[in-house]
Every structure is written in structure tokens, then in C-alpha cells.
Image (cartoon, rainbow, N blue to C red):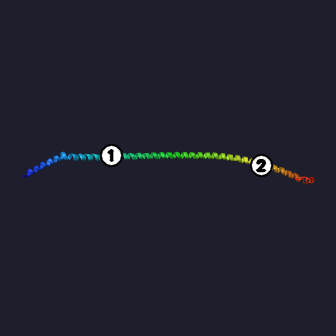
Amino acid sequence: MNINLTLIGQLIAFAIFVWFCMKFVWPPITGAMDARQKKIAEGLDAAGRAERDLRLAQEKATEMLRDTKKTALEILDKANKTASEIVEEAKHTARTEGERLIANAKTEIDLEVNRVKEDLRAQVSVLAVAGAVIINWSNNWPHNFKRGKRC
């Protein structure tokens, strides 16, 4: 056997093996690698889009939260203002009612004072008449006793 012929035979067999691999084995392997690379690229793009969407959603949520807080503060301010107005109105109503009650009480007091004055005048007039009778009787006492009058 000749080494050159063996070497040439091995070279031909290797060339046929390389051609066979390049024709039948390599395309499915490269196709699978390309598909996998494409899936990885799509996954990275999807991750980038998801990250961007997440950032946008966080910004939107932060903005909505800020708007909600602002609206809540406006509602609280309106509620406090309304409460203050209601309290002021109640104070005014109570003040008016108090003034009316005081006026009614003063009127009743004046009426009671007048009634008491009238009662006092009547009692004073009765006492004055009684006093006058007693004075008159005491001035004329000896004369009244002699005449047989009794009080």
C-alpha cells in the first residue's frame, strides 16, 4: 500500500464527508441556530418593549396618583369650606335665635314687672286705705268708743 494513495483516499473521503455535512447536516443546524437567535432577539425586543411599557405605566400611575391626590385635596378643601360655612350659618342662626329669645324674655320680664307693679299698686292702695282708716279711727278713738262703734 502506498501512503500517498491512502492519503488521497482519506482526503477524498474527508471531502465527501464535508460535502455531505455541508449539504445535509449543516443547514438544519444553522436553521435551528438562526431560529433560536431570532427567538432570542424577539425576546430581547419584547423585554425592551415590556420595560418601556412598564416605565410608561409607572409614569402614568404616578401622574394619576398625583392627580388623585390633587383632587382629594380639592375635595377636602371644599368640604372644609362647606363645613365652615355651615358652622358660620349655624352660629348666625343661633345668634339670631338667641337674640329673639332674649327679646322675648325681656318682653315677658317687662310684662311680669308691670303685672307685679299693678299688684303692688293695688296692695299699696289697700294698705293706704287701711292706714287711712286706722289713722282716722285712732284720731277719733275716744269719740268712736263713746259712740259705740267698733272696728
Residue with the most extreme right position: 146
Which type of secondary structure does the marked residue at label 1 adopt?
helix
**Residue 45 at x, y = what percent?**
31, 45
Q: Which amino acid is tagged 1?
A: Ala
Q: Label 1, on which residue?
A: 46
**Residue 59 at x, y = what percent?**
40, 46
Q: Which mark is residue 107?
A: none
Q: Mark 1 and mark 2 in contact? Answer it, CB < 8 Å.
A: no
Q: Residue at x 71, y 47 (%)?
A: 108
Residue with the most extreme left position: 1
Label 1 CA crowd tier, 10 Å (few <14, some 14–19, many 20+): few
**Residue 129 at x, y = what percent?**
84, 49
- Left or right of 55? Residue 5 is left
- Left or right of 9? Residue 35 is right
- Left or right of 46? Residue 130 is right
**Residue 151 at x, y = what percent?**
87, 53
- Dot 1 or dot 2: first in sequence order is 1
Q: Looking at the image, how many numbered discs can be counted on the residues?
A: 2
Quarter-of-image position of residue 89: top right
Label 2 CA crowd tier, 10 Å (few <14, some 14–19, many 20+): few
Q: Residue at x 82, y 50 (%)?
A: 126
Q: Label 2, on which residue?
A: 119
Q: Residue at x 61, y 45 (%)?
A: 93
The alpha-carbon separation of the residues under discs 1 and 2 comes to 105 Å
Q: Which amino acid is tagged 2?
A: Asp
Which type of secondary structure does the marked residue at label 2 adopt?
helix
Q: Residue at x 24, y 47 (%)?
A: 32
- Left or right of 37? Residue 64 is right
